Image (cartoon, coloured by chain):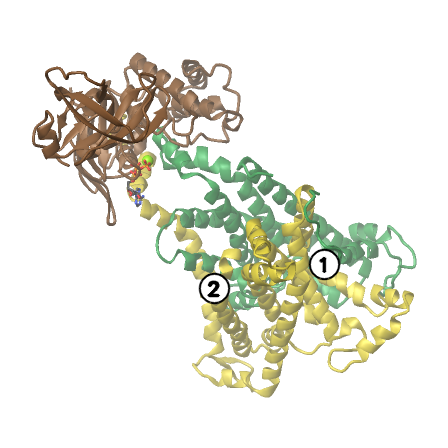
Chain colours: A yellow, B brown, C green
Amino acid sequence: MSGAIATNPRSRLSDFFYRHSGLLTFALLLPPLLWIGIVYLGSLFALLLQSFYSLDEFSGLIVHEFTLSTYEQLFTPTNLTIILRTAVMAAAVTLASAILAFPIAYYAARYARGGWKALFYLAVMMPLWSSYLVKVYAWKLILAKEGIVTWVAGKIHLGWLLDALLAMPVIGGSSLSFSYIGTFIVFVYIWLPYMILPTQAALERVPKNFIEASADLGASPRQTFRTVILPLAMPGVIAGSIFTFSLTLGDYIIPQIVGNSRPFIGTTVYALQGTAGDIPLAAAFTVVPVVIMGIYLMIARRMGAFDAL
Amino acid sequence: MPPAVSFQHVSRHFGHVKAVDDVSLDIFEGEFFAMLGPSGSGKTTCLRLIAGFEQPTSGHIEIFGETAEGLPPYRRNVNTVFQDYALFPHMTVGENVAYGLMIKGVARAEREAKALETLAMVKLKGFDQRRPSQLSGGQRQRVALARALVNQPKVLLLDEPLGALDLKLREQMQEELKALQKELGITFVLVTHDQGEALSMANRVAIFNEGKIVQAGPPADVYEHPRSRFVADFVGSSNVLPPEFAAAHGGTHAWTSLRPEKVRLVRAGEALPAGQFGVSGRVASALYQGAITRIAVELNSTRIIAAIPTGMTTIQEGETVALAWDACNLVAMEAA
Amino acid sequence: MRSEPGASVPLKAAAVGGLLFLHLPLALIFLYAFTTEEKSFQFPPPSLTLHWLSVAWFDRPDIWGPLWLSLKVAVLATLIALILGTLAAAALWRARFFGKDSLSLLFILPIALPGIITGIALRSAFDIMSIPFSTWTIVLGHATFCIVVVYNNALARFRRLSPSMIEASVDLGANGAQTFRHVILPQISSALLAGGMLAFALSFDEVIVTTFTAGQQATLPIWMLNELIRPRQRPVTNVVAMIVIAVTFLPILAAYYLTREGEHTGGSGR
Ligand SMILES: Nc1ncnc2c1ncn2[C@@H]1O[C@H](COP(=O)(O)OP(=O)(O)OP(=O)(O)O)[C@@H](O)[C@H]1O
Ligand SMILES: [Mg+2]
């Protein structure tokens, strides 16, 4: 035996952790846990706390007393409209991303092979990780009145269609970059990769013999798709929707740069904490997406979406 | 001289599963010890207790007279050859073999020389610069062996080291392992569920069942004198005769084991010599197995399997034959 | 491409169309960096020039400060995330305790919840504790959501380590620290590097949280945001956008190859 008693302190520490391996796990976990716990959860808690304070309307100072009056303010018709507008936008964006993402994910998962597959993956990863602001900016260029969309529409003699679109009530506007359509397009563009990757991951996991078995049992390709592939891909789509939905709910930059300047939750929060200095109401506003996402995550978890993350 | 490994009433339970259950066992220095048993009988757990990867739930383990409980694996002078070899993929073969020496702080030149020497011993000269992924299964197995042996452990633990190899290679490796053990004089503890392997390689075999050692002893002893029906069945195959039948045919009034190869065919009209007993019955099945033919003969109270050298006579299913055995081949067992 | 019952034409068209939709806008950024039209986004550009590259380099000192700050923040945030993310992954990989799933959810939370929440939460915490804005307040926020990137990469690789290999190391005399250094670290290092690169790219162009944690300081994305809202020389913004694309593109590409190589040595079929 090479000596039962360790002499130097470092190997004694090693022995200690070997005998108490649970403690080692705990020691490893402690720093990240403290960080997330203090920096992140602590801040979230501070935020929540703020939402129970109120703003003194005359002095503009925050009254550090527990009150629900801020939440009363939250449920005024104007604010409810903002929440509704954001939720509808988030839902529309999620739906559109799911529809756009599916063919790409399906193709990449089932047909692309070797070099093509790597190319596909990179082609999705690149926009996902490349600069958010640059991408928003690119769309500003595209959607501008004198920009490429107008130019292309003119070239192919579809200018009238664009004009008709912009003349539509609610979603239209003076140009694409000043309309809901524009905001919607940019949201879909920015969050699309977040939908593609989990969907593709879920589709990769559909075993090929499932599909063959289904065909064997006499199912048409369409039936196979509906009854086998779609249900199995669903957890991936839901995982993706967590991102698209949540990110749209909280974004405050896209509507500022491309859109008709009607407020969303994000822009409202931004304005409230900045120029208005009404941190309590801003805090109360952020509780809305947290609650919505909390419910969303619970449902998603029940449907097994976390395995697809 | 204390035993190399000593188990005193050792148990290892996982919740309700008694993986090792009250095992007492001594393994002596220089011995080639085999642990044999069906899947899930606790062999690997026993090995892991020796190596230090598991701690006993109760009982006491000594390695060369020193208490082993609480001693981490890296402080035990015991090395393991893993079933999946567990080679380090990011190191060359040479670095793999030199790993233990590097950890001990042996200088580079010296440990490289030792590694080469050990690789030569397992017939892998010239492979030291390769990666494990560039080796065949048998070669990886040898690297795993060299990696353990280079540390000159006092006990070498081998968990089904030949399980992944094909028959031919396995037989070759069995011989080499046996020779190596003789040459080095290291205590080997081999886990296997291949009874042929255990019987041919070991000085002593322990038969495991459901976490307990049901019999231990030299291979011939265990084979010739199984103490229980389980051992008789598991080690080779055996006819297990009921007490009444055994008493009437040369044995005592006990459950009795009779090896198929000890049963012979009686020619028509042949008189049985003294000390031999016989029966006759209908052949229910005859299985040709190359050198022998295995026939099952149906009697009133039991059925007897006999392994008959092929080519003496051709035996048809349905025909009636007479069988005989020496009384000394009947082995009375303690339990059914 | 291997022959398989090939994809139908509409599916192919939809897939390729989707990818074009993802990439063409970025190409436009490059085009507009060379336009001679300064005031509007006229398409096609009247003519092309290299003028703006030199303007950005020589005449706009306001770019350098933010660029430097962004790099500094990204490096610091990445280092913190590397340490904490690896620790978290190691712990949860070893752990067999109840509540492991909730813990991993906790680490994902900073990217699952909208960034504005993280931002304003940090901001109100700084307020309450009267912490003045500094480089470190930005780093604090960035590290928080970068941890998960490293964590995910590291955990995936940890799970591919075979337990018997670690036992083999311990069996050969290496204690926990030595096993980590000689056996575990070399095998997870490429995943850590990849995670670090992604974290760097993520931090380098983060703007949503940064707006709340920067105070009066400007990182490069904040500089860009200001230019978007109050443009001065539009093509200069494009030049900077090109730089940002380049600075994030390379680490992402590297990360991809690092993790892919790992899969190959891991013995995946194709
Ligand atoms: N870590 C563990 N946790 C729970 N149960 C375990 C653990 N390790 C072993 N067991 C159980 O203990 C019993 C004995 O396992 P062991 O691996 O020792 O069997 P074995 O004899 O080596 O079998 P095999 O020949 O299949 O390798 C089994 O029922 C197994 O399921
Ligand atoms: Mg086993």
Which residue is the extreme one toward the top?
A: B183
Q: Earlier in the sequence, mark 2 or mark 1?
A: 1
Q: Is residue A61 visible?
A: yes
Task: Look at the image and tell me in which quarter the C terminus of chain B lies.
Answer: top left
User: Marks 2 and 1: which is nearer the front?
Assistant: 2
Q: Specify whether C213 is left or right of A6.
A: right
Answer with the quarter of the image where residue C236 lies: bottom right
Q: Amino acid at mark 2?
A: Arg
Q: Chain of mark 1?
A: A
Asked whether B49 or A232 is in front, the reply is: A232
Find residue A50 and report its horizontal and vertical position in percent.
Answer: 48, 75
Vertical placement of C239 versus B265: above or below? below
Asked whether C21 or A232 is in front, the reply is: A232
Find residue C191 and report its horizontal and vertical position in percent.
Answer: 54, 43
Find residue B189 and report its horizontal and vertical position in percent.
Answer: 28, 25
Task: Look at the image and tell me in which quarter the N terminus of chain B lies.
Answer: top left
Vertical placement of C200 versus B115: above or below? below
Residue carrying label 1: A134
Between the residue at mark 2 and the residue at mark 1, the CA separation in whole angstroms equals: 33 Å
Asked whether B103 or B279 is in front, the reply is: B279
Residue in the image at 49% along x and 50% along y: C85
Find residue C86 and report its horizontal and vertical position in percent.
Answer: 47, 47
Q: Is residue B98 visible?
A: no
Badge 2 marks a residue whose secondary structure is: helix
Q: Specify whether C2 is left or right of B223.
A: right
Residue carrying label 2: A301
The verdict on label 2 being within 8 Å of ligand 1 is: no
Q: Chain of mark 2?
A: A
Q: How many marks?
A: 2
